[in-house]
């Protein structure tokens, strides 16, 4: 395991000494660093990943998170996506919402001794050269596994007018303008106060339908908010204003929670867990909207289906604008359900998120309201939800040329080779092949995001070792995002001198500003070795191994947005 806190150039010395799997090129050629987004979700809901259970001490929580980050470095990941708002609560010091019970076991109780978990996560991730993206659930108010009493500050107590019961869950009503405002306030607060690299939401828009005791879909209780929205539109029309803005009742969408029984049950919104491959309800009215409410309003300005989709559209668009207004360099990502509509592409069957969840994810991608798009393709290569067919279709819809980094179901990899391959028990090679397919289909800056982080670190069917020894053997830079800016980092200034132990390297930016990352390349003979290291590390020694001492060093700086600057070369003297 490589711990960058020990010294990144010690690891580089090993690469130089061994010269294993590095490209042999002419001495006047410098190899480009690979580009690929490699990330994993760290789920906090139901203590799926972190913290491992409620009530851990501050020190134990920190140790667990550091272990996940160190393992991420060892596996050559370059980002993690940390869930910080699972149920209208917070895993950080919020002025808006109470502390999550997944930390202490009691909602509203801060860590003791006090620390801010998000600030700690940002600091520790950046020390290791990892991006830290924060994952919000904008719609879920209370999950089924919650045990502690809501505090007076929790929205279910402080603002019950915008909260609805749906089965055993509590949800924000998507049609309430204050629900949207609250979410945008929460996101803006985090973006302002923390040095994060990305904002992320998942597939929980209107809730996945729940059946009542008679086996019929339970209607989502938004008749009143819909009626108010249509009345407001009528009033606007009467005054010649038209349109359907926030005043008309367009707000946030409700949410759906991950299942607590994560180990053997797909989570994170996977159809296999909640809906089954046949998805018989996909073609039927969801939440009973048409059957129960379709004729309730006389000639409404918008059908309820369209109104619900518009609520979700507005949330996605306003989230993107709010983040960019505060910090344009912070990436915005969405990981929707992996199928837009059955039959898209031809032959694909499954849940219709457009008509069931009211999530028009294709529109969000087409409009460019994301910087990266992570459809949850938690299915195998062959079948009614074919991984390559779906990925090719989503990529064909990527008209704004945003990053396409699909989500992959590491939780479906079988525990060991002794387990017979089956649905939900894949050989590790299935996931490895999916990474290769992603690289083939997404030719410009591919990437993958794994659910969840513990599932790629517990070596299921040898997955961790197979990644370390194969597809993730070399490091990779996060692909650049040119639509967010073309700023190039300053040229580095480097000094490389031979010492009794090897080569002493000093590097700094010529403009005095801190670099996000350095790409350090060393040449011995005609062989180059490349290492990507945190920008804050500027002085180290590259140890020589016998007579294999580096003859030349080349260094470049990389920005937060992945822009690589000029490569500066220096002979070792």
Image (tube, grey):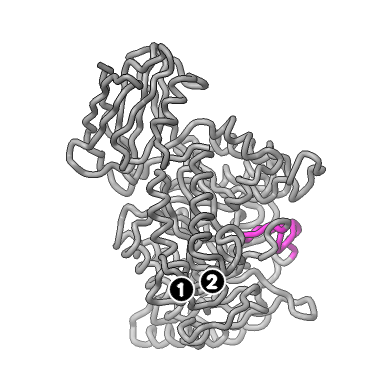
Q: Residues within 10 Å of mark 2 (few under 14, many from 20)?
A: many
Front-lying residue, 237 or 542: 542
Residue in the picture at 35% in, 22% down: 501
Front-lying residue, 560 or 339: 560
In the picture, residue 221 is in which quadrant?
bottom right
Q: Judge whether residue 432 can be spotted in this image.
A: yes
Q: Mark 2 falls on what kind of element? A: helix
Q: Which residue is mark 1?
A: 110
Front-lying residue, 482 or 302: 482
325 vs 144, left or right, is: left
Would you say the magenta stretch is mainly helix, strand or loop? loop
Boundaries of the magenta span: 265-280
105 vs 91, left or right, is: right
Could you say which disc has been placed on residue 104 in the image?
A: 2
Q: Residue furthest front?
A: 500
Residue in the picture at 44% in, 64% down: 316
58 drawn magenta: no
- Identify whether 411 is placed above or below 35: below
Residue in the picture at 32% in, 59% down: 324
């Amino acid at each position: 395991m490589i711990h960058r806190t020990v010294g990144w150039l010690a690891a580089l010395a090993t690469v130089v000494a061994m010269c294993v799997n590095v490209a042999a090129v002419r001495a006047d050629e410098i190899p480009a660093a690979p580009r690929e987004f490699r990330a994993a979700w760290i789920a906090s809901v139901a203590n799926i990943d972190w913290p491992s259970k409620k009530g851990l001490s501050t020190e134990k929580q920190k140790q667990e998170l550091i272990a996940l980050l160190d393992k991420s470095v060892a596996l050559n990941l370059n980002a993690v996506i940390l869930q910080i708002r699972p149920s209208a609560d917070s895993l950080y010091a919020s002025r808006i919402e109470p502390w999550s019970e997944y930390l202490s076991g009691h909602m509203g109780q801060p860590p003791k001794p006090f620390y801010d978990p998000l600030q700690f996560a940002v600091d520790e991730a950046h020390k290791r050269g990892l991006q830290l993206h924060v994952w919000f659930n904008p719609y879920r108010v209370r999950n089924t596994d919650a045990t502690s009493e809501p505090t007076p500050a929790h929205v279910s107590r402080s603002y019950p007018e915008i909260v609805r019961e749906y089965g055993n869950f509590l949800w924000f009503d998507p049609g309430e303008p204050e629900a949207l405002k609250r979410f945008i306030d929460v996101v803006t607060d985090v973006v302002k106060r923390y040095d994060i690299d990305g904002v992320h939401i998942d597939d929980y828009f209107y809730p996945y339908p729940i059946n009542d005791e008679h086996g019929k879909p339970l209607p989502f209780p938004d008749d009143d908010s819909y009626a108010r929205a249509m009345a407001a539109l009528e009033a606007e029309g009467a005054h010649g204003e038209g349109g359907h803005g926030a005043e008309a009742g367009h707000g946030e969408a409700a949410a759906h929670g991950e299942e607590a029984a994560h180990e053997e049950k797909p989570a994170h919104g996977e159809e296999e867990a909640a809906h089954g491959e046949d998805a018989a309800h996909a073609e039927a009215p969801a939440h009973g909207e048409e059957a129960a409410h379709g004729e309730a309003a006389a000639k409404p300005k918008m059908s309820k289906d369209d109104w619900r989709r518009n609520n979700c559209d507005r949330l996605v668009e306003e989230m993107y604008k709010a983040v960019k207004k505060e910090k344009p360099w912070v990436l915005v990502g969405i990981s929707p359900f992996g199928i837009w509509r059955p039959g898209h592409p031809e032959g694909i069957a499954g849940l219709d998120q457009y008509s069931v969840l009211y999530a028009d994810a294709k529109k969000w991608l087409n409009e460019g309201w994301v910087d990266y798009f992570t459809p949850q393709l938690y299915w195998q290569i062959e079948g009614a939800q074919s991984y390559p067919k779906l990925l090719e279709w989503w990529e064909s819809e990527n008209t704004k040329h945003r990053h396409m980094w699909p989500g992959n179901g590491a939780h479906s990899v079988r525990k060991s080779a002794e387990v017979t391959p089956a649905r939900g028990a894949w050989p590790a090679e299935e996931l490895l092949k999916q990474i290769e397919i992603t690289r083939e289909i997404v030719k410009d800056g591919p990437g993958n995001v794994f659910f969840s982080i513990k599932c790629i670190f517990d070596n299921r069917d040898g997955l961790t070792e197979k990644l370390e020894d194969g597809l993730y053997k070399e490091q990779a830079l996060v692909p650049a995002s040119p639509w967010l800016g073309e700023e190039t980092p300053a040229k580095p200034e480097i000094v490389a001198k031979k010492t009794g132990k090897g080569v002493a390297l000093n590097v700094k930016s010529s403009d005095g500003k801190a670099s996000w990352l350095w790409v350090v390349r060393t040449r011995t003979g005609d062989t180059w070795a490349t290492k990507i290291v945190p920008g804050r590390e500027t002085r180290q020694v590259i140890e020589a191994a016998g007579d294999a001492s580096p003859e030349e060093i080349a260094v470049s700086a990389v920005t937060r947005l992945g822009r690589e600057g000029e490569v500066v070369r220096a002979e070792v003297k």
